Image (cartoon, helix red, strand yellow):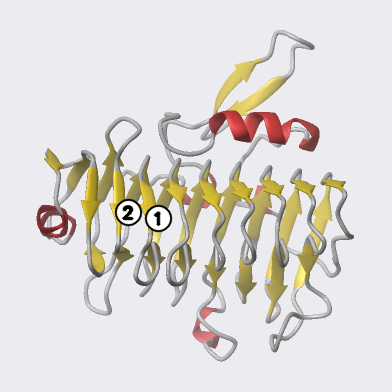
Amino acid sequence: MHGFLAAVLAAGGLVMAAPASTADGFATGTTGGAAGPTVTVTNATDLARYAGANTPYTILISGRITASDMITVVANKSILGVGSTAEITGGGLQLGTTTRPGNNVIIRNIRFSDADDDSISVTNGAHHVWIDHNEFLPGYDGSLDIKRKSTNVTVSWNRFRGTDKTMLLGHSDNYREDVGYLKVTYHHNWFEGSNQRHPRVRFGEPVHVYNNYYDDIGLYGIASTENAGVVAEGNYFENVAFPCHSTGGYAESNPGRLVQRANVFVNSGPCEAGGTVAEPSGYYSYQLDPASSVPSLVTAGAGVGRI
């Protein structure tokens, strides 16, 4: 399938999705800093210098970097962790400013912890962004927020451990400028004991949420609001009292649309669904794994040190 490697399981001969080596989903075509040189950084000062440069870079993070604020990442960057110990703690990454776009960015194989704001913020019209095989630990605000007319983003094979405001998609109920943007793919992520926003969606369509493992979730799984259109398929919900909010709205947000199919619910409530949504297959090809295989696939493949 386009954008995927395939692994053939000997038992039963099933073809299962394996972590991709290039961007897939809505981020297909993202190349990051491939056109530029490769540098290795070990501190926040050097990371900020190369991430904010006007030319392409592949930036390798070695070890733990302590930051005290959001580091700005502008266009044509790959930020990749070395081995299984690369970490950004205390701060986070902001893709794009109001004058310098954060387009064509890849972030892979990094642990984010104790951020004083968001761990990653994709904002200000950033597009073609691939966020893959990272690990998110609790921070002050959102773990991974996508907003303010950003689009063509894929969030894949990440692990979220005990996070609260996990993934926001759409700035606010009043920011209608997001209509027509926020096309995002979320697949093969592991939400492990996290609380809410997996994702919390406003306005975007289609938002494709597939083959994710919802593992002992606190408040809720997915929320589609403000006329967003979400397709949730092939996910595995285990110990999730409220897998989906949509047609009834959520909190102070107006209702959204959600199509759910081929999901598994174990010790979980129903997924509130309704309305029609544009099909993701009209934008890209993908391979849907059986929901029953998602826990084993995702726990074996998601997070750092797995690429």
Q: Quadrant of residue 183?
A: bottom right
Position of 103 relative to 125 (above/below): above
Residue 31 % position (x, y): 32, 43
Foreground of the two, 222 or 304: 304
Left or right of residue 199: residue 20 = left
Closer to the chain start, of discs 1 and 2, is: 2
Q: Quadrant of the N terminus?
A: top right
Labelled disc at residue 128: 1
Lateral position of residue 206 relative to residue 30, left or right = right
Specify whether residue 221 is in view.
Answer: yes
Q: Residue at left 55%, top 74%?
A: 180
Helix, strand or loop at mark 2: loop
Q: Dots 1 and 2: beta carbons under 8 Å?
A: yes
Amino acid residing under circle 1:
His
Image coordinates of residue 218 in percent, x first then y, are: 70, 62
Tell me the amino acid under the disc marked 2. Asn
Vertical comparison of 274 with 1: above or below: below
Residue 71 screen position, x and y as percent: 23, 64
Q: Please determine whether, in this image, residue 240 is positioned above or below residue 273.
A: above
Residue drawn at x 31%, y 66% as measured from the top left:
94
User: Alpha carbon of mark 1 to alpha carbon of mark 2: how far?
Assistant: 5 Å
Q: Which mark is residue 104?
A: 2
